């Protein structure tokens, strides 16, 4: 009888905090700068250079702890994590060992629903701790040489450590997506994995179903995308399961994920805490965190994405699909809310933002040489202009089809909807005689559709409507067209 196995996983997520300067020096942070230009004696570990703490980084760390329901430490301290490797010129990393800035906490996740239009099951993944440290440099390996860039070395890095509380690759994906959305929404970090602003190590173990003892832990590195993390743990689960079924032993080690070959390979045996010889940093005093400081930061915590999603669905009656697209993007939510406040129907406002605005923004990024230059924050179409277009539809001044044609031009030129409607003569036509004449011609030209409608096929009337709308370039009032066709067909 075969033994069935279950997976237990924990994640270590490293987040580069969005601060003006590095963790222990005034040198600036940034991505894409010429190699080794964001350095100074502190970053390079030169003799006599002393670290000075970055207050902004500590404040943002407290903010993350409050956002995720952690216990904020009364006192945290700095430790030296010693290791000999060229990505850290001091040969040690300033980190936090036994007194981190945050303990406990949780991340709410949503598992996929039965269909993409239905909300899935929600649960909380428990956290162990969050600690603050300095980032290391980046090594680039070539066939015969390796080069090191210390631009990111010393940048403030937050490590968010989960409990072994994830059990499927889907949960891992949901956890990272939820955590990333929360951090971006709170202004903690852009969390761009391609730029190294968010990095993840996954600890994977399997055990026989029904047992409580954790299996041997294997750590996965080089997981550079959220989907890559999911693929990496899927492979590792298969590898470990097959090994145990064949009677092989799983060794505690660190393995590298190869995204091209879609497999993991062994890097080294896993280091233990004593291997790093942690000891308190003699150049840095412990940090005492004032409760009043924590209370002030707590007032700045934004609404969590899932809380916002539930509010939108309950108060505005938005469909799940719209809230799922909106609530992971705080600037997009702000744009939507400003638009909705200027219209009578928040559902229509959400549909325009999620479908039409996001489409134009995406296309603009593709067309732009500087992709970061096109975003909802600097969108050429302000919320008031989109609201005006929606209101013109509601007031039967333009049809929905005409509005769809106008929107790309509004986005490209910045012209208002009212301005373009007058300029192009696109006001909706509601003249009864003209529409009746066009409806009569549509029935005459398509007797099959007319007979099908009379025979009880309701959808057949759409072909007749389409003919009328085409003849008027979409300017006929759809309601008047519908009423007129039904009257003529029933007489």
Image (tube, rainbow, N blue to C red):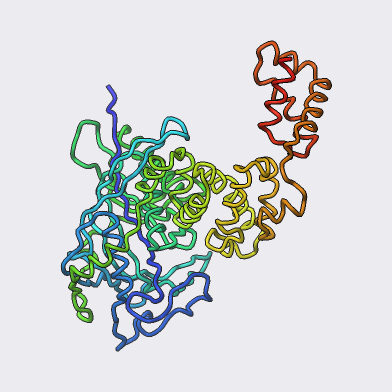
In this view of the protein, which residue sits in the foreground, 54 or 346?
A: 346
Q: Residue furthest top?
A: 455
Which residue is situated farthest in the bottom direction here? Answer: 48
Answer with left or right where residue 105 lies relative to residue 362: left
Q: Looking at this view, name the residue that lies furthest to the left.
A: 74
| Residue nearest the observer in this picture, 320 or 235 | 320
Image position of 130 with respect to 440: above or below: below
Q: How many marks?
A: 0
Where residue 313 appears, as percent x and y from the top left, is: 41, 40
Q: Nearer the viewer, residue 362 or 458?
A: 458
Residue 288: percent from left, percent from top? 17, 73
What percent of the width, then of the height, locates residue 431?
75, 36
- At x 43%, y 33%, the residue is 118
As drawn, is 156 to the left or to the right of 477?
left
Residue 123 is drawn in which quadrant? Answer: top left
Q: Position of residue 457 (x, y in %)?
A: 66, 15
Task: Determine whether 408 is above or below 379 in the image.
Answer: above
The C terminus lies in quadrant:
top right
**Quadrant position of residue 367:** bottom right
**Which residue is drawn at the image coordinates 64% and 53% (left, top)?**
363
Residue at 44% over, 68% down: 138
Depicted 261 relative to depicted 291: above or below: above
Quadrant in the picture for the N terminus: top left
């Amino acid at each position: 009888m075969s033994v069935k196995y279950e997976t237990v996983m924990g994640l270590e997520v490293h987040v580069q905090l969005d601060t003006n300067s590095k963790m222990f020096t005034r040198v600036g942070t940034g991505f894409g700068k010429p190699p080794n230009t964001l350095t100074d004696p502190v970053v390079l570990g030169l003799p006599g250079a002393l670290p000075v703490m970055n207050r902004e980084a500590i404040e943002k760390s407290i903010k993350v702890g409050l956002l995720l329901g952690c216990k904020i430490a009364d006192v945290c301290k700095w430790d030296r994590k010693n290791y000999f490797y060229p990505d850290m010129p001091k040969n040690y990393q300033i980190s936090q060992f036994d007194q981190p800035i945050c303990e406990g906490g949780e991340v709410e996740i949503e598992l996929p629903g039965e269909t993409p239009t239905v909300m899935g099951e929600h649960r909380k993944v428990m956290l162990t701790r969050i600690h603050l440290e300095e980032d290391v440099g980046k090594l680039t390996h070539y066939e015969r040489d390796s080069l090191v860039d210390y631009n990111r070395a010393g940048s403030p890095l937050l490590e968010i450590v989960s409990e072994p509380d994830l059990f499927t690759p889907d949960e891992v994906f949901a956890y990272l997506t939820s955590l990333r959305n929360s951090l971006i929404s709170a202004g903690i970090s852009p969390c761009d994995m391609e730029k190294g602003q968010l990095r993840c190590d996954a600890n994977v173990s399997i055990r026989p179903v029904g047992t409580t003892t954790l299996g041997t832990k294997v750590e996965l590195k080089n997981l550079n995308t959220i989907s890559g993390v999911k693929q990496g743990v899927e492979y590792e689960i298969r590898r470990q399961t097959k090994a145990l079924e064949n009677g092989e032993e799983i060794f505690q080690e660190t393995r590298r994920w190869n995204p091209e070959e879609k497999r993991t390979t062994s890097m080294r045996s896993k280091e233990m805490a004593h291997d790093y010889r942690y000891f308190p940093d003699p150049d840095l005093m412990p940090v005492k965190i004032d409760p009043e400081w924590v209370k002030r930061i707590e007032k700045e915590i934004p609404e969590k994405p899932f809380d916002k999603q539930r509010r939108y669905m309950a108060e505005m009656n938005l469909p799940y699909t719209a809230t799922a697209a909106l609530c992971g993007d705080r600037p997009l939510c702000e744009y939507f809310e400003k638009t909705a406040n200027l219209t009578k129907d928040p559902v229509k406002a959400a549909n325009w933002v999620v479908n039409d605005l996001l489409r134009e923004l995406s296309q603009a990024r593709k067309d732009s040489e500087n992709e970061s230059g096109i975003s909802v924050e600097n969108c050429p179409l302000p919320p008031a202009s989109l609201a005006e277009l929606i209101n013109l539809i509601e007031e039967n001044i333009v049809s929905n089809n005409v509005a769809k044609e106008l929107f790309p031009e509004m986005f490209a030129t910045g012209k208002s909807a009212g301005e373009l409607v007058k300029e192009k003569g696109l006001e909706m036509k509601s003249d009864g005689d003209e529409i009746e004449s066009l409806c009569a011609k549509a029935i005459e030209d398509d007797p099959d559709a007319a007979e099908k409608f009379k025979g009880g096929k309701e959808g057949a009337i759409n072909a007749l409507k389409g003919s009328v709308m085409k003849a008027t370039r979409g300017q006929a009032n759809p309601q008047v067209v519908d009423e007129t066709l039904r009257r003529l067909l029933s007489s």
